[in-house]
Amino acid sequence: MREVVLVTGPNCHLCDLAEDILRPLLKRKNIKMTKRDISSDISLKKKYGLRIPVVLINGGIERDWPFTKLQIAQLLNYS
């Protein structure tokens, strides 16, 4: 089963845009998305603080913003 995590931050308008791109795509593919806020995890903040939003697919594939629906769909097909 595919796992998709959206690494976000507080008051992040780009994170909202990323979620808007991901949600319909993942719904069509019946894939659950988990959001992880960097403000609640110091290790996430250190790793992704300047890169959010970041999409993590199956714990190995990372895609930083900016990205398109097509780019994420292609990553999902390869994972």
Image (spheres, rainbow, N blue to C red):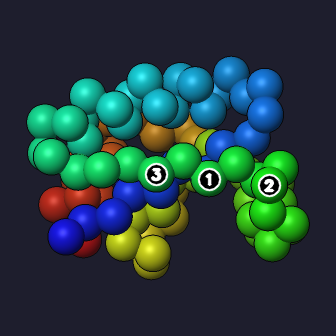
Residues at badges 1 and 2 in contact (C-beta under 8 Å)?
yes
Question: Along the line of sight, which residue is nearer the eye, 8 or 64?
Answer: 8
Instruction: Tell me the amino acid under the disc marked 3.
Output: Thr
Q: Which mark is residue 34?
A: 3
Instruction: Tell me the amino acid under the disc marked 2.
Output: Ser
Q: Is residue 15 above or below residue 5?
A: above
Quadrant in the picture for the C terminus? bottom left
Question: In the picture, residue 66 is in which quadrant?
Answer: top right
Q: Is residue 52 visible?
A: no
User: What residue is shown at x 25% (from left), y 66% (from top)?
Assistant: 2
Instruction: Tell me the amino acid under the disc marked 1.
Output: Arg
User: What residue is shown at x 20% (from left), y 36% (from top)?
Assistant: 27
Q: Which mark is residue 36?
A: 1
Question: In the picture, residue 48 is in which quadrant?
Answer: bottom right
Q: Residues within 10 Å of mark 1 (few under 14, many from 20)?
A: some
| SS at circle 2 | helix
Quadrant in the picture for the N terminus? bottom left
